[in-house]
Amino acid sequence: MKRNETLMGALAAGLITIGFPGHVVKAQGAPRQVEVTAKRFAYAPGEITLKKGQPVVLIIKSEDVAHGLRFRELNLNAKVDKGGSAQLSFIPDKTGDFVGHCSVFCGSGHGAMSLTLHVVE
Amino acid sequence: MRLPAGVILAAFAAALTGCKVSPPGKIERATVTFVKHHIFIGNKSQKNPLEPNAATWADGKEAFSHYCVACHGMDGQNTGVPFADHISPPIPSLTSDEVQRYSDGQLKEILDNGIWPSGMPGSKGTLSDDELWAIVVFIRHLPPAGSQGIPEMYNH
Ligand SMILES: [Cu+2]
């Protein structure tokens, strides 16, 4: 899995550099960091607005038990240890609303734990 | 398909009354199954938004293991569940016709809201939509009976 991601990353970076000079400008600069806390049974904030093409790092911190955050459509998944933190780094490449769910079973309200990303132009 | 609801409900009521004096016979059972399939369990036409592939199957198996295994076993066929045959109605094997004849949408409806008058509880809120649809994929392709061992909680 790890190796695959690295490979894909390298491939994507290569493509961007060679093929799409316009995107290089858009994708450069420090990624925007957004802190998200996870606590039974909600994320705070529960909604985040992102710009298409702008790199972002979601820093997810658990304030209680182990949680996760998964966006199936975006192929992103992070697992956070009890009281720990994890990161999701990505560049949103399509606009729209994407709903992520907790991906580590955390109890009776687990299924209702969601975070919505609004990706805009 | 469209029988008047009154007729069916009357038949169902008769079937239920029958249950009180003796175990459900063939006709009663068939009636109850018919009523469940055609009247009480809606959401027949909703399609599963997930592809039935190895990844969603694995997601479904994982989600199933948190909650459903206590009554249905790791294999969905009651393996290792001590009370499966001792409650009324008994817990059906999820590979049975009775269960498999539900559409994906109906299975999702049952997972969301449970099913009356059995003890099956709803999982809406406990598991996400995504996980519940993955469980539908898992239910459609259950592993061989007994192949998954018995649930942790009965392992002592
Ligand atoms: Cu959680």
Image (spheres, coloured by chain):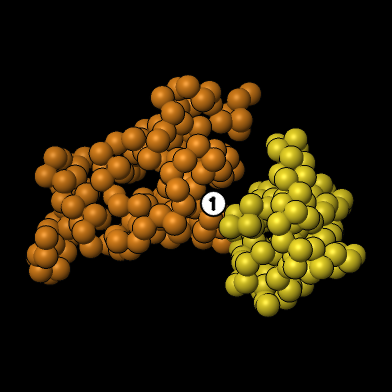
Residue at image point 47% right, 46% down: B135
Q: Position of residue A6 (x, y in %)?
A: 77, 41
Q: On the rendered structure, is B71 left or right of A45?
A: left
Residue lying farthest right?
Answer: A30
Q: Colour of chain A?
A: yellow
Quadrant assignment for the N terminus of chain B: bottom left
Chain B, hue in figure = orange
Residue B34, percent across and down? Answer: 18, 52
Q: Chain of mark 1?
A: B
* Of residues A1 and A79, the one drawn nearer to the viewer in this rendering: A1
Q: Residues within 10 Å of mark 1 (few under 14, many from 20)?
A: many
Of the pair B83 and B111, the residue shown nearer to us: B111
Mark 1: amino acid: Glu
Question: Which quadrant holds the C terminus of chain B?
Answer: top right
Residue B132 visible in rendering: yes
Helix, strand, or loop for circle 1?
A: helix
Label 1 sits on residue? B131
**B153 vs A10, nearest the viewer:** A10
Q: Position of residue B56 (x, y in %)?
A: 51, 44
- Horizontal side of residue A99 vs B102, given as left or right: right
